[in-house]
């Protein structure tokens, strides 16, 4: 039976009454925020942690040292500014998702929410990670795999800084796969549960494989900053992927 995301505190979720979006925000933020409010999301205790706790969470996910001070400054602003409501709603949406639920539209955060805007997604990820870790524990994902999966938060921050010279990142939808129990780091490769699309279905059929569009599958990714493409390491990752398929039978999907 499908189930919602776990609450690390063990408390039963309750409905919350969302506040309407601020009329001073642009439509790119107000419209997605109104959508999140309208979802009547389960109540999730979301509070920007202390600077000390935030640094601990950041280090656990390999956030680069040069990004810590901008992240802490952004967190301080979100404790008192209207962007805190958007932060709470986005964390609630991710924490309440089942592993195959479609991701809600997330606003393209600008400086009117928090500056630097790239830190907003990092804060969403760090506040959602405890819910995702609880999901891993509940479904038998080992500690090393769980830890390596969330280290990709720091990896994406490093990629973003190398590309743009700014802190944070701009692709929360990618990390939502990690935060909702869909993607796992299995060594040299990452895999996520997915469905066959039109192109891969056609290619498989052309090579003599039975395949139907929409059929469950595992998508494979090659993470950056993880060394050379060693064949034996890739084979080990794929062997572990078979174990993930077995575990996934007991997950909400």
Image: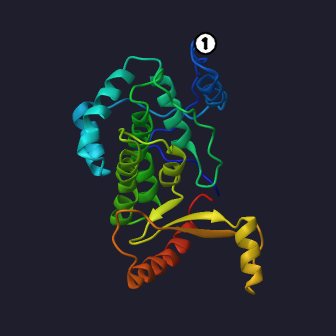
Whether residue 27 is visible here, answered yes or no, is: yes
Residue name at image x 40 percent, y 53 percent: 133
In this picture, is 148 found above or below 62?
Answer: below
Residue name at image x 34 percent, y 59 percent: 147
Whether residue 210 is visible here, answered yes or no, is: no
| Element under disc 1 | loop
**Residue 33 as seen in the image, left or right of residue 128:** right
**Residue 236 as seen in the image, left or right of residue 194:** left
In this picture, is 44 found above or below 114?
Answer: below
Give the quarter of the figure containing the N terminus: bottom right
**Residue 217 as seen in the image, left or right of residue 199:** left
Residue name at image x 36 percent, y 38 percent: 166
Give the quarter of the figure containing the C terminus: bottom right
Number of marks in the rendered image: 1
In this picture, is 39 found above or below 228?
Answer: above
Residue name at image x 52 percent, y 70 percent: 247
**In the rendering, at what x and y percent does residue 181 appear?**
51, 56
**In the rendering, at what x and y percent does residue 243 appear?**
49, 76
**In the rendering, at what x and y percent does residue 99 appear?**
58, 54
Q: How is the image coloured?
A: rainbow
Nearest the camera: 92 or 67?
Answer: 67
**In the rendering, at what x and y percent does residue 196 appear?**
70, 67
The residue that label 1 is drawn on is 23
Determine crowd level at label 1: few under 14, some 14-19, many 20+ residues with C-alpha closer than 10 A. Answer: few
In this picture, is 23 found above or below 125?
Answer: above
């Amino acid at each position: 039976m499908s189930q919602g995301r776990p609450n690390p505190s063990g408390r039963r979720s309750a409905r919350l009454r969302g506040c309407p979006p601020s009329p001073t925000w642009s439509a790119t933020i107000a419209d997605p925020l109104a959508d999140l409010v309208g979802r009547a999301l389960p109540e999730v205790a979301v509070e920007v942690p202390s600077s000390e706790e935030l640094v601990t969470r950041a280090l656990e996910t390999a956030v680069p040292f040069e990004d810590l001070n901008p992240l802490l400054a952004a967190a301080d602003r979100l404790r008192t500014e209207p962007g805190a409501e958007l932060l709470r709603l986005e964390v609630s949406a991710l924490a309440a998702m089942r592993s195959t639920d479609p991701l809600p539209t997330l606003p393209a955060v600008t400086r009117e929410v928090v500056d630097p805007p790239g830190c907003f997604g990092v804060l969403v990820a760090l506040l959602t990670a405890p819910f995702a870790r609880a999901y891993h524990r509940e479904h038998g994902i080992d500690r090393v795999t769980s830890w390596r999966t969330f280290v990709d938060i720091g990896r994406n921050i490093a990629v973003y800084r190398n590309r743009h010279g700014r802190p944070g990142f701009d692709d929360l939808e990618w990390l939502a796969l990690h935060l909702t129990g869909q993607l796992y780091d299995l060594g040299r490769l990452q895999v996520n549960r997915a469905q066959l699309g039109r192109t891969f279905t056609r290619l498989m059929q052309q090579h003599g494989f039975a395949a139907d569009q929409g059929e469950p599958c595992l998508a494979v990714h090659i993470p950056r900053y993880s060394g050379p493409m060693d064949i034996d390491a890739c084979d080990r990752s794929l062997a572990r992927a078979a174990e993930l398929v077995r575990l996934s039978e007991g997950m909400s999907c």
